[in-house]
């Protein structure tokens, strides 16, 4: 999806960027409920009934006083600066210092012909030093802050959020914490964490909401109406120590099974209906 080079110090080598994440959302179309006709969106000038073709539509930024500043594509390209097709690494920072909140989208970097040795050298150095290369590059006309990291013998690239894109935690109205846990409560909580410990297996988790929506679509297409069951929210824990003791006694397993059955699309009653057209 992108070809360019990586530059750190005086070392430059060619790479190719591969997307490793994809949107899996179920996409819907807007329709007229009365007859199922598709809805089309047309563009009009606010003070006119005349439709405007796409080639005559531009972009403008609205100032605080309401004035609009029109920006054309050439001016916007000039603001972006030259598209050098280079990932310029500016610093190498300890990986543990980067809060995961700064990471956005993941990609894989692959070496291109002639760059294999330098690629392997950078990957090995990052792995041994446990550092991440921080740099910038232009992707789809927009400059991105990025991190290069070693992962399983290859280089990963992560686009990153800039600091001013994050809300300062001090500005959030987060409720104050309660009392400090007792030694007994902490010991039991640690035991519960150990009891539920497991290796990370991402394939064991699926998007249950997406699967439920697809199942709903299939049922509707077959003329079946689905009525969702109302599941009450779990009650808050009045006695923390008793809840910990019950958890260690094995009750969480039953609660997890109940929560699984209450997932979207599960436990719903279905009844025949006439398919809408």
Image (tube, rainbow, N blue to C red):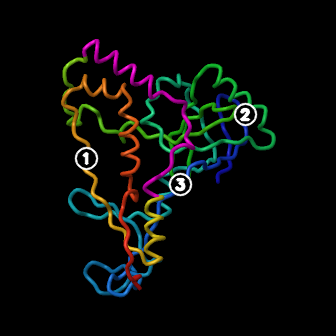
Tag 3, which secondary structure?
loop
Alpha-carbon distance for marks 1 and 2? 52 Å
Q: In the rendering, at what x and y percent does residue 7 appear?
A: 66, 35
* Mark 1 vs 2, N-terminal side: 2
Which segment is the magenta one?
182-210
x%, y% of residue 52?
39, 82
Label 1, on which residue? 233
Question: Which residue position holds label 2?
Answer: 119
Residue 102: which disc?
Answer: none
Tag 3 near tag 1, CB within 8 Å: no
Q: Identify the residue under disc 3.
A: 141
Residue 203 lies within the magenta run: yes
Task: Indicate whether 63 appears above or below 220.
Answer: above
Q: Is residue 38 magenta?
A: no
Please state which of the two labelled residues, at mark 1 or mark 2, is closer to the viewer.
Answer: 1
Question: Quarter of the image holding residue 224?
Answer: bottom left
x 31%, y 17%: residue: 186
Q: In this view, does 120 lie to the left or right of 178?
A: right
């Amino acid at each position: 999806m992108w070809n360019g080079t990586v530059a750190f110090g005086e070392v430059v080598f060619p790479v190719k960027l591969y997307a490793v994440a994809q949107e899996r959302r179920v996409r819907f179309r807007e329709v007229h409920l009365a007859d199922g006709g598709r809805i089309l969106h047309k563009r009009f000038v606010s003070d006119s009934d005349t439709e405007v073709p796409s080639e005559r539509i531009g972009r403008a930024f609205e100032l605080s006083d309401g004035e609009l500043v029109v920006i054309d594509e050439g001016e916007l390209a000039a603001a972006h600066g030259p598209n050098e097709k280079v990932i310029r690494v500016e610093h190498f920072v300890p990986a543990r210092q980067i809060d995961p909140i700064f990471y956005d989208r993941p990609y894989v970097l692959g070496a291109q012909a002639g760059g294999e040795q330098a690629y392997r050298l950078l990957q090995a150095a990052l792995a041994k030093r446990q550092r991440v290369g921080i740099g910038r590059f232009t992707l789809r006309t927009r400059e991105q802050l990025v991190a290069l990291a070693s992962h399983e013998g290859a280089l990963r690239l992560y686009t990153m959020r800039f600091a001013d894109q994050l809300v300062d935690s001090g500005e959030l109205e987060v409720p104050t914490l309660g009392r400090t846990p007792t030694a007994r409560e902490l010991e039991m909580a640690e035991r519960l964490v150990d009891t539920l410990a497991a290796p990370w297996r991402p394939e064991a988790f699926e998007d249950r909401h997406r699967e439920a929506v697809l199942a709903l679509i299939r049922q509707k297409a077959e003329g079946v109406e689905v009525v969702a069951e109302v599941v009450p929210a779990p009650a808050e824990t009045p006695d923390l120590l008793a809840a910990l003791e019950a958890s260690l006694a094995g009750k969480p397993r039953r609660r997890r099974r109940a929560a699984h059955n209450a997932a979207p699309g599960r436990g719903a009653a279905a009844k025949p209906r006439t398919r809408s057209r």
